[in-house]
Image (spheres, rainbow, N blue to C red):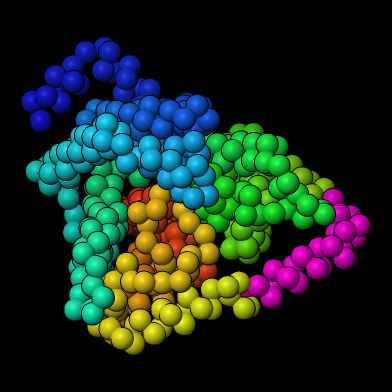
Amino acid sequence: MKSATKKLNFGKAAEILRNILSSKYLPFVTAAITVGCYYLGLDLLTYYYIVISGVAVLLLLDDATPIFSNFLFMSIAVSKINSPSPNAMGSDFYFRPAVLAQLIILIVIFAAAAIYRIVRAAMRKEFRLSPVFFGLCGLSVTFLANGLFSSDYNPMNIVYGLFMAGSFLGIFTLMKDNVSCTKESFEKVAYAFVAFSAALLLELLVVYCTTEGIIQDGCVIRNKITFGWGTYNQIGCFMVLCIPAVFYVAHKHKFGYLFLLYSMVVGAGAIFTMSRQAMLCSVIVYPLCFAILLIRGRNKLINRIIGGIALVIGIVFVGIYYRELFNFFHSLLISLKTGSGRTGLWVKAWNNFESAPLFGTGFYAKLPPSLNTVGLDIIPLMYHDTVLQLLASCGILGLIAYVIHRIQTIVSFFKNITRERVFIAITVSALLLINLLDNHLFYIFPTIMYSSMIAMLVKSENIK
């Protein structure tokens, strides 16, 4: 592999390709390809692009940061026409032998390139052990042991445990020692999120414009907000995760106030996903990012003027529609207080934990029908809460391993507080907050995003 990559790195063409792959604007090309293929039903073309460009990053670039963009867009590649989800077409596309064979080949190729980068980092003595690495090793062991000795043990538990271990530990190991964590690296991640938010907004807008009966009696029927890759809860989570990155670009860019205006569009998009968790989290995350921008960002005067105008418009809007807003948020608070149908799942989680307190009953324990399903139904039904999910699926050992991991990440953040690390921490915290009422942290694709950001957090502990 080393000999092959030397040949790949030789020549002007390779240099041009490296410049393209390193560009912070490449995610916008990826967004256009992903969205275009989504509506054309060309899922495989998206995966070919993501894997080929990802492998090129791993083989040609010393700084593998651009691959983060691939991780983002692979999560929204399943088109509605090809999705096996009952929320979409219920297609058998992903179960056809020809499709499965191609996907398996692509996964093997990407995995080989990832393993090569990990081995190369070790051979170059760039691999560094850290407390977070060992904490993730412990957490991965509990994932692999999920449901062990349970009376209803399902062999799929070990399969999903492998997915979880790979998503947490494997991606962390790949990213931590292969990203440079310079200001340019963080900027590339931020632009990837900006491009991702644009793709999400476009798909959300199309749903609102093309879905019959989505608004009835002045109310949005959120069950109609579905995609091939997920539902309103998935797009709500993704939209909130994009907010800190848009503000980070507003911090850095000469014309940052334009990104401030765009952040308002993203914030509104998070609200219009009608995901209660996204609404609650955006109400916390958006003002926090805005306050940091006003205190520490560029273009302070313009930003404050924009903020003042937005505040006045908001007050007028509330004054006109205060009754409707009061009723809406009152029902929202009641649904959050009662768990919005989750209480039955939470009780079941506790009962399952009590029946198998050490290793839990596994990820594939029998549960009542889920509140909603994601794009691919290989994902097991879950309990809509991080703590209860770990207790029920992995037992007390799983929760202890997770608590240790969480403490280690907090300690890592406080070792070096910089503007870049603050925005990474806000994004991670937003995901964790949403997961108090949902399962995204165990849905593989969001897990990959999480592990990548944790890797950047750990790698940048000593970088000023």
Residue 106 seen from this side: no
The vertical placement of 212 against 153, above or below, is: above
In the image, what residue occupies the spot 43% across and 40% down?
91
Q: Which residue appears farthest toward the bottom when viewing the image?
A: 354
Residue 319, position as x, y percentages in the image: 90, 60
Percent across and percent down for residue 15 are: 28, 18
Image point (62%, 49%), residue name: 225
Asked if the magenta segment contains residue 251, the reply would be no
- Which span is picked out in magenta? 311-336
Q: Quadrant of the N terminus?
A: top left
Rendered position, 109 above or below 400: above
Q: Residue furthest top?
A: 12
Residue 189 % position (x, y)? 44, 41
Is 89 in front, or is 426?
A: 89
Q: Is residue 99 left or right of residue 40?
A: left
Residue at (27, 59) in percent of width and height: 160
